[in-house]
Image: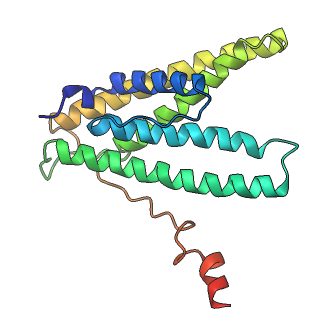
Amino acid sequence: MVSTLQFDARQLARLQTLWTEQWHCLGGTAHPPPLAGLEDLVSQEHHSNFALWHEEDKTRDPLATDSDIAGVKRAIDRLNQQRNDRVEQMDAWLLQHLPQPAGSTPLHSETPGMMLDRLSILDLKVFHTYEESERRDATPEHRERNSGRLLILREQRSDLTDALDSLLRAAAAGEKTFKLYRQMKMYNDPELNPQVYGKRRG
């Protein structure tokens, strides 16, 4: 029996916020412990975005060397692939555990996995924007500007959480459905990236 919490968008959003705070307190080195069902996949996907966020920060370091940037770029490619894989796995899990829709059930173009990915990124934006709104070494104008941004981000995240909750409820009731959309990423596949297979032929 699958817990109804697995389909509770607000609970999943609260967990993302909790994990964001915990991982920042631990210095970003901790990996999420194994959980059950969808929550485990949401945790892993959120951690990929968490790690991606901080790797992207490194690319803007004005003191970073070309070698540093190359290493970070490879890490970003790896993490982005993990992130996309987890989005597909979340949708596959949901499709396996939700009722099978009838042929006439309306199709929702954006999947729950895609929406959870957007919620994950918004949660990271909220965390870091809050930090900027409280920075003691920043100007009052800087703090005020980020306080305004924070209000907008929180509203966007609340709206998206409501939209995801509505979709999950409708899917559970057989009123809406979605498909598993494969990302078909090409750049990490050595058989599809000409910069890789072209070098092998040479």
Pick whichever, 135 or 111, lies toward us: 135
Residue 5, x across and y down, in percent: 25, 26
Pick whichever, 106 or 76, lies toward us: 76
Q: Is residue 191 left or right of residue 199?
A: left
Which residue reaches farthest right? 63
Residue 93, x across and y down, in percent: 26, 46
Residue at 11% of width from left, 34% of height from top? 1
Q: Quadrant of residue 173?
A: top left
Please, is residue 190 above or below residue 51 in the view?
Answer: below
Q: Is residue 184 left or right of residue 178?
A: right
Please, is residue 67 above or below residue 133 in the view?
Answer: below
Which residue reaches farthest bottom? 202
Residue 23, x across and y down, in percent: 54, 28
Residue at 51% of width from left, 19% of height from top? 155
Please, is residue 72 above or below residue 3 in the view?
Answer: below
Residue at 56% of width from left, 56% of height from top? 78
Where's the C terminus, which quadrant? bottom right
**Is any part of residue 32 visible from this angle?**
yes
Residue at 15% of width from left, 39% of height from top? 174
Q: Quadrant of residue 60?
A: top right
**Is any part of residue 178 visible from this angle?**
no
Q: Is residue 24 left or right of residue 119?
A: right
Residue 86, x across and y down, in percent: 41, 48
